[in-house]
């Protein structure tokens, strides 16, 4: 699976990238047909504490699945987005 992390207006440390990669890689256990995954990490400009946004997009033959979550930390946001994608992958697998 091709894996890409994009950060907007900041640079992510390797520990964060590795954490997200491990989470996204677990999706491959559910569906080995995943072609690629792309993660976007952004800081929301609001004054709220929950200003970290993680968007995860995975490409399955014929479909693109997407989840976006906003939390206090990038780890929490990425974890929530991957959980949402797990449910989407299960639904997609059930339909196929």
Image (tube, rainbow, N blue to C red):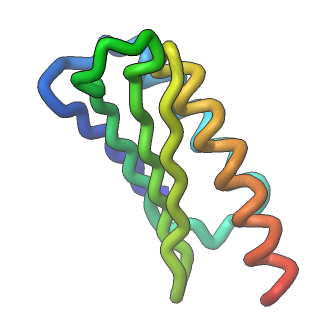
Please, which residue is most extreme toward the left here? Answer: 9
Please, which residue is most extreme toward the front here? Answer: 47
Disc tally is: 0
Image quadrant for the C terminus? bottom right
Q: Is residue 31 above or below residue 71?
A: below
Residue at image location 43% in from the left, 36% down from the top? 54
Q: Is residue 6 above or below residue 84?
A: above
Residue at image location 59% in from the left, 42% down from the top? 81
* Residue 80 falls left or right of residue 20: right
Residue at image location 28% in from the left, 24% down from the top? 43
Give the x, y percent position of residue 77: 54, 29
Residue at image location 80% in from the left, 72% down from the top? 91
Give the x, y percent position of residue 57: 45, 57
- Which image quadrant is residue 30 in? bottom right
Q: Is residue 51 above or below residue 32?
A: above
Closer-to-camera residue (61/94): 94
Give the x, y percent position of residue 23: 62, 34
- Which image quadrant is residue 22 in? top right
* Residue 83 falls left or right of residue 6: right
* Residue 15 falls left or right of residue 24: left
- Which image quadrant is residue 32 in? bottom right
Give the x, y percent position of residue 82: 63, 43
Please, which residue is most extreme toward the right here? Answer: 94
């Amino acid at each position: 699976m091709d894996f890409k992390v994009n950060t907007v207006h900041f640079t992510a440390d390797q520990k964060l990238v590795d954490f997200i990669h491990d989470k996204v890689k677990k999706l491959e256990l559910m569906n080995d047909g995943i072609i690629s995954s792309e993660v976007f990490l952004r800081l929301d400009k609001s004054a709220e504490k929950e200003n970290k946004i993680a968007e995860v997009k995975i490409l399955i033959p014929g479909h693109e699945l997407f989840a976006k979550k906003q939390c206090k930390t990038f780890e929490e946001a990425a974890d929530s987005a991957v959980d949402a994608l797990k449910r989407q992958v299960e639904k997609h697998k059930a339909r196929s």
